[in-house]
Image: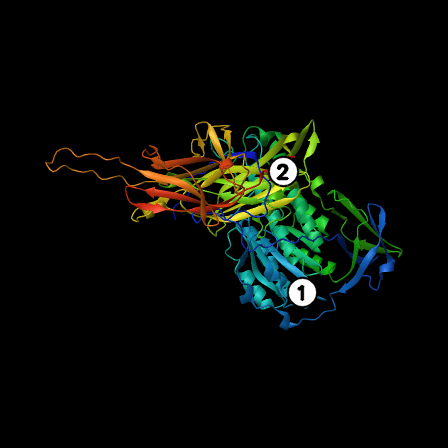
Amino acid sequence: MRMPIPIRSIAAVVLAAGLFVPALPAQDPGHPASQSGEQQFTFKTSSDTVLVNIVVRDKKGNLFRGLKASDFTLLEDGKQQKISAFDYEQIDMAVANPAESIVAAETKDKVVSTKAQLLAPLNSANIDPNNKRLIVLFFDFTGMEVEEIRRSVDSAEKYVNSQMQPADMVAVISFTSSLRVDQDFTADKTLLQKTLARFGGTNGGGYSAGDTGDTEGTPDTGAAFTADDSDFNTFNADRKLQALQALSDALAKIQQKKSVIYFSSGLQQNGVENQSQLRATINSAIKANVAIYSVDAPGLQAIVPGGTAEKASLRGVSAFSGAGMRNAYDSNFGATETLSTLAKDTGGKAFLDTNDFGEVFSKVQEDTSAYYVLSYRSSNLLKDGRYRKITVKTGLKDVKLEYRSGYYAPRDFAHFKKEDREEQMQTEIDAELPATDFPVFLAAAYFRLSDDRYFVPVSLVVPGSEIPFIDAANQDKASLDIVGQVRVGDTKFVIANVRETVKLALDKSQNVSRKNVQYNTGFILAPGKYHVKLVVRENQTGKLASFETDLNIPDLRKQQQKKAVKMSSVVLSAQVRPVVKSQKDNPLARNGQELVPNISHVFTPDQHLYVYYEVYDPEKARTETAADNSAPKAKNPVRVISSIEFLQNDAKAFETPVLEVRDLSSDRRAAVFQIDVPLQKLRPGYYMCQLNIIDDASGTFTFPRFPILIKPEATAAAAAK
């Protein structure tokens, strides 16, 4: 497949005159813009229920059983909460039921995205999780060395062979370039052994976090410079956390406690850049009743002055001043600190600086042998994203309670930080279903720049009535965040991105609530099939809306052998504005003026209708040779004629004068038409506009049609008030 031409984009926001209409008129057949057909909608639900798993032990460390809800007092930030549900899980008394094992062939090598709600195999209805210990062996191979993989897999095989109990239901997940379900929950040791055996030759490679900082104290590799890998570390950490979040979301449908044993080479955060994703991952795990037991795969490491034998010598005087040792300790701490946070905040435990990974399996079995589950709805209704401390007390003496210490409250839009807002937009652009908080419409067109380059203007319209402007200094102020993607056909391959924050500051007299706010951008693409999606967020309330459509850019070279008129899309406009900056590739920007596309096709009598289109490679007239073989008589090389008819009730209401183009644009071989129609010549009502385009030299013609609506003057006047 031919790769797309590199993309440029331009953007502008204008006020589109005319009342907003609930549906766009149909486009002409050649127009790539389209409305979505049968709509699917996203229904959003939220739950404020908080689950707390409690293990009660006596002074000898034995499990304490037989307690009731009345034996516990639960507090959040020091305020007592009402226990809404109570349960007691006793796993150590369960026996194996081979019939509940899942056949490996049903879930073998299922590859999924790191986004949430895509690990469907783990929500299998073929198992009964009651009185079962649900354990997920999660191998994060990104950045692992071969010996670290071997150590992790060997410990898992040892657990399956000798420690696995009849009540244990185990699933195996791996993460490299994607999240993979290698084995669904099963009690069959044979299936688990076969799955783990496939990891024997796995090469970690993947994404390995590096150290950041200046060259002082870093290994001397002979390179000309040391690259700053902070952005790489941020991306790497987010990918790992997103994988954990996706796993937690997939496990959420199973209500019982789930234990995730997370084998990782470490998780290096980059300052505060990863805090938003870390908080989201912990929240997802808590809501799904998932406890993370993190295992540092490198195990016990010796940090020696000057660095280990397999690394290059340090730069500068770090090896002699102790700075190198300090950097090594800082790097080791940074890689394991996040593992500790994940474990502590979800009610698990981190296993660091040890080569005996068998302890983690014993700890999981011990924590899930018998435990109490309390649930409550927080009396604090604020969605501020703050950490809330949980305290559980009991009147019994000489007992110890083990439970997670708290959770992060959900955030509403008013409390979103910059990272949260960006994550929300990215999540929505990746979502399968559209956001529908308010209506939004999109249209696109295409114009040939060269044989393999087309300019594609895209317009997005939001009703002004949906934007809650703030009155400040005699202006209505608001802002919109816009993110968009252009993908190749039905694939996920993104070839173009748009990310804009548009600030609106408009005079109150413009009465924006009765008009449309229009966002215009453009791309340069090669011929082919694409999918365009744009997401808009109104930044006062946080409401989201999205629109997506397929876009087909024809390859006009393939029409050279056909007797047909090759033309661009037809763009209608009622507004012309000065060109703000150079747009040499935008055919709609000519002679210092730019046409603003009208995608609603709704006009008022006091406006002008501008119709713009182009005809490509019209045939040249042949020459005639005299009978005496004298010099040929040259005819006009090109002759393309066109007009517009306005039809109402199948009768012609108006026709523009016939225009004739004999000269082509030198660079694009296009006959350019821009027709100006004063709409005061037409009565208000619906019209079908027909373009009459004839290539006189070749004898070919085409008659595309498109509908328009001219509103009565009374309606237009009312809209302006």
For residue 649, which numbered disc appears in the image? none
Q: Residues within 10 Å of mark 1 (few under 14, many from 20)?
A: many
Q: Quadrant of residue 307?
A: top right
Residue at the disc numbered 2: 719
For the residue pair 48 and 708, the one nearer the viewer reads as 708
Expressed as whole percent of the image width and height from the top left, the position of residue 495 reads 47, 43
Q: Quadrant of residue 424?
A: top right
SS state under label 1: strand
Above or below: residue 620 compared with residue 96 = above
Point out the residue furthest to the left here. 628
Above or below: residue 136 compared with residue 417 = below
Q: Residues within 10 Å of mark 2 (few under 14, many from 20)?
A: some
Expressed as whole percent of the image width and height from the top left, the position of residue 489 reads 46, 50
Above or below: residue 590 compared with residue 603 = above
Q: Mark 1 and mark 2 in contact (Cβ < 8 Å)?
A: no
Expressed as whole percent of the image width and height from the top left, the position of residue 581 reads 49, 28
In three-dimensional space, the C-alpha distance between marks 2 and 1, rounded to whole angstroms, equals: 68 Å
Q: How many marks?
A: 2
> Which mark is in front, 2 or 1?
2
Amino acid at pointer 2 = Ala
Of the two numbered discs 2 and 1 on the same chain, state the one appearing first in sequence. 1
Amino acid at pointer 1 = Asp
Q: Quadrant of the C terminus?
A: top right
SS state under label 2: helix
Expressed as whole percent of the image width and height from the top left, the position of residue 16 reads 56, 37
Residue at the disc numbered 1: 168
For the residue pair 298 and 264, the one nearer the viewer reads as 264
